[in-house]
Image (cartoon, helix red, strand yellow):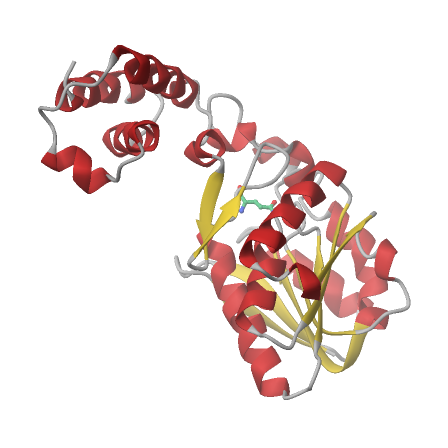
């Protein structure tokens, strides 16, 4: 079969579960042939060998079962870099990039020689590694309750060349860093209400429940973390905490109670949805 025939065939199969079927087929075939999508378009008549076809069909089958492209490829883009991902970690989302922007702006303006940042529930390490990569003086501590997630985060820190300034610590929430203080704290803890986690074949259903499920209202982990937050913040430090548009107000109320006198602002994501709070101690 030619490139074009194979793509046409796969797109119609993929369309059952994916609303980006044609693009998915192109990405997967480009991956198998180790070319880019432009090459596929320029070589639509080129025959594909039976071996490559079989490889491609196996990947297309995974995608048509709903598995996210990022897990199939083993990587996802975040803040202009490539991060290794597997099913032990949440796939980094573009809506988290504005939180990173704000953390970077604050770190740069802080003007400290060696600012310290903390990422609680780091997952793939996308946020922690980005902070370290963008601000050459920052030291980042990153925690996660999942040892498998931390393996992925360490691979990413190595590949991005920031392993020297990132410490990955295994444990519940901020438990591994008790007694320390930070200039910037970021957290994208699981915040999806249990009942809102979609079933198969939704791609989100392939992500670790432990990275998504925040209990009945989505805020169980933030509620558990809130009493520790104040002691972790250095004077005039900030915390940036991501949640969903439906529970961000409730998160702000939890934090206002736990960190009295904090100045709390709701911030929006690229889709103009309220997505994270900025807490200034
Ligand atoms: N933004 C993710 C989603 O909506 C949830 C991430 C999280 O729970 N921290 O699927």
* Residue 16 visible to the viewer: no
Q: Where does the image place residue 272, in percent across and percent down from the top left?
A: 41, 61
Residue found 27% across the figure and 36% down from its top: 35
Viewer-closest of 233 and 84: 84
Q: Where does the image place residue 3, in percent across and percent down from the top left?
A: 17, 23
| Quadrant location of the N terminus in the rendered image | top left
| Quadrant location of the C terminus in the rendered image | bottom right
Residue found 36% across the figure and 22% down from its top: 17
Location of residue 263 by image quarter: bottom right
Residue extending farthest right: 179
Location of residue 28 by image quarter: top left
Up-down relation of residue 118 to residue 7 (above or below): below
- Relative side of 244 to 239, left or right: left
Residue extending farthest bottom: 111
Up-down relation of residue 92 to residue 99 (above or below): above
- Relative side of 70 to 57, left or right: right
């Amino acid at each position: 079969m030619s490139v074009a025939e194979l793509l046409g065939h796969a797109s119609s199969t993929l369309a059952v579960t994916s609303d980006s079927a044609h693009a998915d087929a192109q990405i997967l075939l480009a991956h198998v042939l180790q070319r880019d999508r432009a090459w596929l378009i320029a070589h639509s008549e080129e025959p594909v060998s039976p071996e490559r076809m079989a490889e491609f069909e196996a990947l297309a089958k995974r995608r048509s079962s709903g598995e996210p492209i990022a897990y199939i490829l083993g990587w996802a883009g975040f803040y202009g870099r490539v991060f290794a991902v597997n099913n032990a970690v949440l796939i980094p989302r573009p809506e988290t990039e504005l939180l990173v922007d704000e953390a970077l702006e604050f770190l740069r303006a802080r003007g400290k020689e060696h600012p310290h940042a903390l990422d609680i529930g780091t997952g793939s390490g996308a946020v922690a590694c980005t902070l370290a990569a963008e601000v050459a003086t920052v030291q980042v501590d990153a925690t996660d309750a999942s040892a498998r997630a931390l393996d992925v985060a360490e691979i990413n820190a190595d590949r991005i060349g920031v392993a020297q300034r990132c410490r990955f610590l295994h444990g519940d929430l901020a438990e591994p860093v008790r007694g320390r203080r930070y200039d910037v704290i970021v957290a994208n803890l699981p915040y999806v209400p249990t009942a809102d986690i979609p079933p198969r074949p939704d791609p989100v259903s392939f992500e670790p429940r432990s990275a998504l499920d925040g209990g009945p209202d989505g805020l169980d982990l933030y509620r558990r973390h809130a009493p520790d937050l104040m002691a972790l913040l250095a004077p005039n430090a900030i915390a940036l905490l991501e949640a969903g548009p439906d529970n961000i107000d409730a998160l702000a109320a939890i934090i206002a109670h736990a960190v009295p006198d904090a100045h709390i602002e709701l911030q929006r994501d690229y889709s103009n949805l309220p997505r994270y709070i900025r807490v200034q101690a």
